[in-house]
Amino acid sequence: MFHYVDGRLFCEQVSLEDIARGAGTPCYVYSAQSIMDAWRAYDDALAGLPHLVCYAVKANSSLAVLSMLARAGSGFDIVSGGELFRVLKAGGDPARIVFSGMGKTAAEIELALKAGIRNFNCESETEPALIDSIAGTLGVTARFSLRVNPDVDAVTHPYISTGLRDHKFGVDIATAPDLYRRTGALRHVKASGVSCHIGSQILDYSPILEAAGKVLNLVETLQAEGIPIDHIDLGGGLGIAYQSDEDAPVIRDFITDLRDRIGRAHLTVMIEPGRSIVGAAGVLLTQVLYRKKSPAKEFIVVDAAMNDLIRPALYKAHHEIRPLQQTGGASVIADVVGPVCETGDFLARNREMADVQPDSYLAVSSAGAYGFVQASNYNSRPRGAEILVEGDRWRVIRTRETHEDLIRGETI
């Protein structure tokens, strides 16, 4: 959805330079068509199987994005009471919400039960007991799955790998049958599924298929004992192409191979994609402030910083950076850095870049996931606006913060 027309970079049919000048920078720009095409790719590929595509809200929790997906019939994977609040405000159906995450508080569980969510994905032996206690007080019965850890290496960045035995997530798949048996004594919770998520930004999805096979073996064991498992939740994890020489997995190919593994299991299939729906659909727009040379380096100083996009500093992640106006082929090797007072404040290092000059604009690609949601006010910097492009129109879906916003709620 991002392409050059006569040397100008567009999102759908809108010039990104028009947005940068109209909305100011830094700002985040999302393509509505790209988001919906990716979500429908999952939903269409699963047609004919009982299924639910639950968008992972943590990837991008903009109300406008959530509302689009809710209108399309999406489910939602949440990991906090705040995300529950957002989904409900956006019109999401509580019966299509799955509550994941390993640190649910009693207050969050109570909110979810009162809302009538579909299912809890539990990450420890004690969590179903807490849900049972709260559900009993409210006079309801809660459905839950145990998130099992299959000890499968997702072959991704160690900070976003979650499927090995030394990770904090889930319960050991070998101990899961005994845990399911013990939860049978609880009166206000019902075991309904098995959950698994092995990590994020997975470019080779064969580990997901391996994990799915282990989950199906567990389901057969549980069903043979009379435990009424009716669904499997295989999480998300498909990656996107952050670099021009990377190939992202094709969603339809992944689902086709997954169906070959699970299609005859007579279970509802739930998946929780996030990054693969919104990641490539967004860019971070920034303006060049200065050009600077040191004896060893050349720097392009921009008005976006690590507080706007933390992934390069946190994960050493690569994001392609393109000029909004093509420069005719001239290039330079430079670091792209921001105004924050940290040496770790960079968007790119030793990158061959267009030879852009002060006042010109750049687009940091693949910022639709884990961009704004991980942004902060470090150095007392207001967070940028969020923009949604729909065809030949664009609109502000979150206004730029002001200095007054920075101190709201504080007292002297």
Image (cartoon, rainbow, N blue to C red):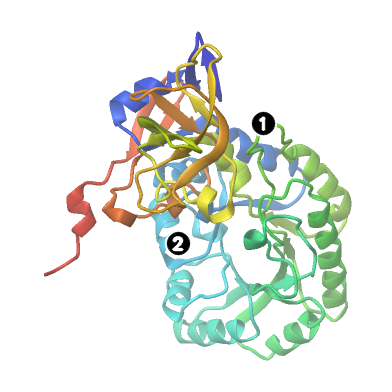
Across and down, in percent, residue 19 comes to 36, 25
Residue under numbered circle 1: 244
Image location of residue 258, percent across then percent down: 82, 50
Residue at (52, 75) in percent of width and height: 103
Residue visible at 19% across and 49% down in the picture: 403
Res. 379 visible in picture: yes
Residue 138, by quadrant, is bottom left
Q: Could you say which disc has been placed on residue 84 in the image?
A: 2
Q: In percent of the image, x 58 and y 36: which residue is there?
A: 280
The quadrant in which residue 191 appears is bottom right
93 left or right of 149 in image: left
User: Mark 2 or mark 1: which comes first in sequence?
Assistant: 2
Q: Along the line of sight, which residue is nearer the eye, 272 or 161?
A: 161
Observer-side mark, 2 or 1, equals 1
Q: How far apart are marks 2 and 1 (CA)?
A: 36 Å
The residue at the far left in this view is 412
Q: Are marks 2 and 1 in contact (CB under 8 Å)?
A: no
Horizontally, is 303 left or right of 130 in the view?
left
Residue type, numbered disc 2 = Leu
The amino acid marked with disc number 1 is: Ser
Q: Where is residue 397 in the image (x, y as percent from the top left)?
A: 35, 39
Whole-percent x and y of residue 165?
A: 75, 75
Q: Nearer the viewer, residue 155 or 48?
A: 155
Q: Residue furthest top?
A: 6
Q: Which residue is drawn at 76% across and 74% down?
A: 228
Secondary structure beneath label 1 = loop
Q: Crowding at label 1, few (<14), some or many (≥20) Cα neighbours within 10 Å?
A: few
Q: Is mark 2 on a helix, strand or loop?
A: helix
Query: Which residue is at the front of the view, 117 or 80?
Result: 80
Q: Please name whichever residue, 99 or 17, is drawn nearer the observer in this view of the structure.
A: 17
